[in-house]
Structure formats: structure tokens, C-alpha cells
Image: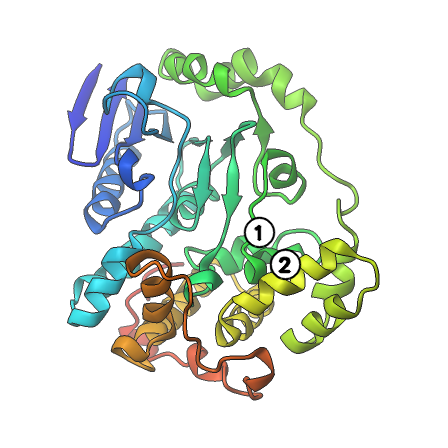
């Protein structure tokens, strides 16, 4: 067994397995640029090493000292480091562009990894944490899993391939999750095609400790066979009314429909949530999900790279909807973002179009090499 202790991740070789532990629990394992680079370096090395047959990733929680058994599991990854986004955007720091280019490249690598890659999605799995897990061959969730793509809450959109994996959810669940940022548990995650198997959190250490002793298929059959047999996928949506509302053409139509639903507490609460989100980014996210249904992963990631550049540059600095959203949620914590436009009714047709215009020629796109 070999272990490399890096600032915010632990990289370990055990038998035939390469193991990654996100080790930034005080920040809910939020991803920094260096973490993205370290994960990429480990996966690339193992991809090309014939002695490595599988890879796995997990997170830590705030209990116990980092790296000790009591600190492991209970938390996966809350996303990218949004405080860094805010600071870098205001400073014009080129590292912001590097972060998104390298993060999306890592997401693509995970989807296309030639060896089994296993994600232990315990605890919070949001934003960038979804990017680290959705491309896995096996996505394990527990009774503690809290999954979401909450980006519209900070004036962003569900990136890291969110357009790709949310648009593949059944019906119009993708639009629902993208616009509301709704937090779902393990059962819904499996029903919506965002996870593969649910196991008791108490059983995760044994599953992890067994990695590297045998091949993926034998490990899976021995330790997850029963759990896999118990998993269920919904043949119909748990909430069929999601389709009724979120299949409508425009954001205004969706909100109107929800607000007019008589005696429907869920609809009223959902409409109230949408009223708090960035009106402009609701329109951008809705268009993103619907465009992505016809795109490959590489095409979707290139589109999202264009979009995230435009989030910070169409209206730079404090005028950025994303900078303002992060300020309100994570910096000043006044929770009163000043969205522009302020209301859903004030977003004019075509206002979202500029976010999908690439600032790069095709042969100069930072993700041009993805296929």
C-alpha cells in the first residue's frame, strides 16, 4: 500500500486499486484548482498503469482529525469553491478560467475512464461533487445523501456536465432540478437515474477497505450483490406533476402554472422557491437543459464552458449575476441578492441567448480536444 498526503486530497494505492479521498472537510470538500489538478493527475497515472484495475473516490466529514477513520465518510463534496470564484472574478484572476477548463476536462475524463471508477456519494453531493460522481461506473448513495444542483441560487447554472446528466433524467425532472436546486435523497437519486445503488452508511468502511483485494466484478458481487438486487428504478415519476409544470415552454409559464395550482402545497412552495432564484439564470438554465438533450457530453461541456465564461464576462465584476449571488449567499451572507432583472416577468425574450454565444473560434476553444 502506498499513500500520498497532499493538502486537500489523500491519494492511495492499495493492491490493484487507486483510491482518492477528498480531505477538506471544513469547506465540505469544496474543490479548489489544486484539488482538481491532483485528482486529474492521479486518475491519469492510474489510467496508464496496468497494475491499477479500478479507482474510487470518497469524501471526509468534520468529525475527527483529517485522515482518521472517524473522519471518513459522512460528506462527499459541496461543489466548487465559490468564495474563490468571487475573489478571482473581482480581481480578474486568470485562475478562474483555468479552474473551469480543468474541472470540465476532469469531468470528461471520469465519464470516459477506461477502468471501473466508483463514487461513494455519502452526505452532501452538490455541484462539482456531481461532476466527480455522475460519470462513475458505480454511484453509491446512502441514507445520508443530500444531492442537488443548486447553482441558480447563486446566479449560475448547473454546470460540470449538468446539462448532460440532468437532461437524461426521466420526463422533465431535469428542468425541475436545474431550476429549483431541489435537494433529493438516495431513493429519488436512483429513481431519477443519478445514482445506482443505496447502501447503509455504516457499511461504507467495509466496502472501501475491501477495494484492491480483487477485481471490480468480484468485489461488486461479494459486497454489493444483495444491495444491487434491492435497488429499484421508478417506472413512472415519483411526482408526475413535475412534468405538468416543468414541461411548459417558458419560465413564466412554469411559474404561472405552479401558482395557479389550487390547493397544491407542493406547487405553491415550488413557485416560491423559483421566485427567489435569479430570474435571468432560470431562463439560461431552462434553455441549457433543453439544448443539452441533443448534445454529446463533449458538446455539452463546450457549451457550458462558453456559458460560464459569459456568466463572469458579459457583465463583469460586481455587475455579474453570479458574483452578486455568491456575495449574498457566501460572502456578505445577507441572503438578499439584487438580481438584474429583478423579476421573472422582466426577463425579455432573447435575453438568455448571449450566454450561449461562444467567445472562442472552434479551433481555439479551451475544450476543443474533447471528443
Q: Position of residue 125 (x, y in %)?
A: 45, 41
Q: CA distance from mark 2 to mark 1?
A: 8 Å
In the image, 103 versus 251, the foreground residue is 251
- Residue situated furthest right in the rendering: 262
Instruction: Identify the mark at residue 182; answer none if there is no mark.
Output: 1
> Which quadrant: the N terminus?
top left
Dot 1: within a 10 Å radius of its alpha carbon, few (fewer than 14), some, or many (20 or more) residues?
some
To which quarter of the image does residue 5 belong? top left
To which quarter of the image does residue 74 belong? top left
Q: Position of residue 52 (x, y in %)?
A: 31, 25
In the image, 237 versus 71, the foreground residue is 71
> Which quadrant: the C terminus?
bottom left
Q: Position of residue 349 (x, y in %)?
A: 58, 88
Q: Position of residue 255 (x, y in %)?
A: 68, 71
Q: Secondary structure at mark 2?
A: helix
In the image, 200 versus 289, the foreground residue is 200
Up-down: is 365 above or below 147? below
At 29% from the left and 46% from the top, the residue drawn is: 31
Q: Is residue 349 visible?
A: yes
Q: Earlier in the sequence, mark 2 or mark 1?
A: 2
Q: Is residue 112 visible?
A: no
Report the residue marked by disc 2. 176
- Residue 141 is left or right of residue 259, and the answer is left
Up-down: is 269 above or below 212? below
- Contact, CB < 8 Å: mark 2 with mark 1? yes
Q: Tell us which disc is closer to us: 2 or 1.
A: 1
Amino acid at each position: 500500500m502506498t499513500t500520498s498526503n497532499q493538502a486537500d486530497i489523500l491519494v492511495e494505492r492499495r493492491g490493484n486499486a487507486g483510491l482518492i479521498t477528498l480531505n477538506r472537510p471544513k469547506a465540505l470538500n469544496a474543490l479548489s484548482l489544486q484539488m482538481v489538478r491532483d485528482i486529474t493527475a492521479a486518475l491519469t497515472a492510474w489510467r496508464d498503469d496496468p497494475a491499477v484495475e479500478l479507482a474510487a473516490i470518497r469524501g471526509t466529514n468534520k468529525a475527527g482529525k483529517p485522515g482518521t477513520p472517524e473522519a471518513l465518510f459522512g460528506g462527499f463534496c459541496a461543489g466548487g469553491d465559490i468564495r474563490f470564484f468571487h475573489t478571482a472574478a473581482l480581481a480578474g484572476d486568470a485562475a478562474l478560467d483555468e479552474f473551469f477548463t480543468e474541472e470540465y476536462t476532469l469531468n470528461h475524463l471520469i465519464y470516459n475512464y477506461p477502468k471501473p471508477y466508483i463514487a461513494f456519494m455519502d452526505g452532501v453531493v452538490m455541484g462539482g461533487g456531481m461532476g466527480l460522481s455522475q460519470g462513475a461506473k458505480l454511484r453509491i448513495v446512502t441514507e445520508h445523501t443530500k444531492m442537488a444542483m443548486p447553482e441558480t441560487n447563486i446566479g449560475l447554472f448547473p454546470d460540470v456536465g449538468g446539462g448532460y446528466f440532468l437532461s437524461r433524467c426521466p420526463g422533465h425532472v431535469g428542468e425541475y432540478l436545474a431550476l429549483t436546486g431541489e435537494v433529493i435523497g438516495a431513493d429519488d437519486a436512483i429513481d431519477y437515474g443519478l445514482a445506482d445503488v443505496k447502501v447503509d452508511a455504516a457499511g461504507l468502511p467495509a466496502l472501501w477497505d475491501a477495494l484492491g483485494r480483487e477485481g471490480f466484478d468480484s468485489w461488486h458481487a461479494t459486497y454489493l450483490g444483495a444491495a444491487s438486487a434491492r435497488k429499484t428504478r421508478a417506472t413512472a415519476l415519483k411526482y408526475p406533476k413535475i412534468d405538468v409544470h416543468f414541461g411548459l415552454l417558458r419560465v413564466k409559464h412554469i411559474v404561472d402554472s405552479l401558482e395557479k395550482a389550487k390547493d397544491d402545497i407542493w406547487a405553491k412552495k415550488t413557485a416560491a422557491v423559483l421566485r427567489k432564484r435569479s430570474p435571468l439564470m432560470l431562463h439560461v438554465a431552462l434553455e441549457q437543459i433543453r439544448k443539452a438533450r441533443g448534445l454529446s457530453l463533449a458538446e455539452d461541456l463546450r457549451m457550458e464552458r462558453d456559458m460560464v465564461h459569459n456568466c463572469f464576462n458579459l457583465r463583469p465584476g460586481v455587475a455579474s449575476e453570479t458574483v452578486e449571488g455568491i456575495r449574498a449567499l457566501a460572502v456578505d451572507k445577507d441572503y438578499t441578492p439584487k438580481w438584474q432583472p429583478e423579476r421573472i416577468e422582466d426577463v425579455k425574450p432573447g435575453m438568455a441567448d448571449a450566454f450561449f454565444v461562444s467567445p472562442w473560434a472552434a479551433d481555439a476553444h479551451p475544450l476543443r480536444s474533447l471528443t
